[in-house]
Image (spheres, rainbow, N blue to C red):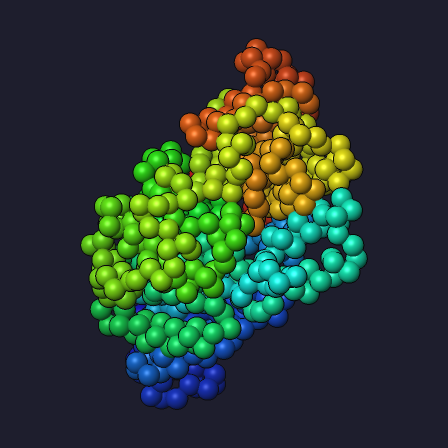
Amino acid sequence: MISEQITQGVERAPQRSLLYAAGFTEDEIKKPLIGVVSAQSEIIPGHMHLSKIAEAVKAGIYAAGGTPVVVPAIGVCDGIVMGHRGMHYSLASRELIADSVETLAAAHCFDGLVLIPNCDKIVPGMVMAALRLNIPAIVCSGGPMLAGRVKGKKTSLSQMFEAVGAYKAGKLDDAGLLECEKGSCPSCGSCSGMFTANSMNCLCEALGLALHGNGTIPAPYSERLRFAKESGKQIMELVRRDIKPRDIVNEQALENAITVDMALGCSTNSSLHLPAIAHEAGYKLDLKRFNEISEKTPNLCHLAPAGNHFMEELNEAGGVAVVMKELAGIGLLHTGLMTVSGKSVGENIAGAENRDPEVIRPVENPYSRMGGLAFLFGNIAKNGCVVKRSAVAPEMLVHTCTARVFIGEAKAVNAIYGGQIHPGDIVVILYEGPKGGPGMREMLVPTSALAGMGLDKDVALITDGRFSGASRGASIGHVSPEAAAGGEIGLLRDGDQIEIDMLHYTIHADVMEEEFARRRKEQVMPESWVKGGWLARYQKQVSSADEGAILKV
């Protein structure tokens, strides 16, 4: 066991004395030490209950003959940090989380890990660390929030942001806004739609790193505690069999994850996190591979913000296993792969039953024949950009629009709320990429402003920043190369015509190369507001969005 480096031999008596000081018994020291990495926090609704999850995990580990050791991880609530300077820290925190989990596990010689994340960047950050360490590990999320209720209808955080736009447009009064505030997020858990957190927790199942139910069992349910106990028991089986993350995550498992991503209609942020996860596993994911898989993968779910279904309904319908069984039935999944259950993908999903064919459409009756995401390429996105195609109005899939260019999110939001954006426009937000932000802020505020003011079917938005999983409409992000790296998106001007074809994966500005060259000579990039702190280091080392915004030394 790895832990023998601190528990065995005369030379390790000082280390054992410190373990005794921490309250461990002689018997506990002799057993496998399992790191229970909890991102519990009182500021994040998705994490406020994780101490209960950790206790349940510990019970499972004890029952299976191990010694659990709870250690912390940080987290950032994307909803709370939205629309202000705090959002610069969100994506960047993924790297801190990965580094901290690696540090704690390697330094203290853990034999295995149970990872307890829930929200956006915490999930991929922990998975990246597990692959980097390559010791037995299992993901046990905190589960999704229950859907909110406003005026008798189910709702979520995305509608809350849109309510601000409705208020600004005079469509909602003070009382209505307060009702939305108090009714949209009714419980602990990750926000109730197929936003980034729930996307990544579902994709952990698809990768084989979590047991069935990880992505969908609601946070307040007692079933979530039972799930946590089973995850705690299962890590001991993984330790005994020496099954490691890199035994599970390979090219085929990554393809399974992309396929499930397309079928579920996951957040565009998955196209940042899956390449980053792949990198830690020793693989490179090309964005064009996403399109190839999307072309043959039917979109089976329309969860919020794309539709009116929520995570609790996906769970009731049978969860991710049902989606995977539908896909496997038409030969779209690699079913022979190992998973943390100790069984193959095919064995895991064999008994899955679709209990609601409207929430999870059969492959014969999909919401669309192609996947939920599309990656566009063209003269202003030579390395690609992404759009959640399943959340775009049909009339916006192929269209030409007029550029309205803004440096930074704030100026764009002011223009939208100020009535300066009109049907047929495309809002262009620059210098919000991994380097330019830095940190690649989410543009949920401007997309929600457009939706709340009734412009989401008439106005597109494009940025080198990114979007919340709660964003809907023709929201095109992750433009690579970004403006701060010399990308052509930074050369756009007001009035430029931009042609978008999401069905054929193209985006093109009607600007000649000679004109781009002339503008490049005149271009003056804004000075970064970051002068110190770790964001300055991040800005220097971060790669482009098409590479997963990973840090390069």
Residue 213 showing in the rendered view: yes
Looking at the image, which residue is at 51% across and 50% down? Answer: 307
* 47 or 437: nearer the viewer: 47
- As displayed, is residue 6 above or below residue 409? below
Quadrant of the rendering where the N terminus is positioned: bottom left
Query: Residue 304's spot in the image, x, y percent?
Result: 52, 52
Residue 551 showing in the rendered view: no
* 334 or 515: nearer the viewer: 334
- As displayed, is residue 358 above or below residue 513? below
* 306 or 101: nearer the viewer: 306
Query: Residue 368's spot in the image, x, y percent?
Result: 40, 41
* 411 or 236: nearer the viewer: 411
Looking at the image, which residue is at 58% across and 15% down? Answer: 511
Residue 491 picture quarter = top right
Left/right placement of residue 531 relative to residue 313 reads: right
- As displayed, is residue 452 above or below residue 197? above
Left/right placement of residue 160 relative to residue 328 reads: right
Query: Residue 34's spot in the image, x, y percent?
Result: 37, 73
Residue 129 picture quarter = bottom left
Looking at the image, which residue is at 34% across and 69% down? Answer: 112
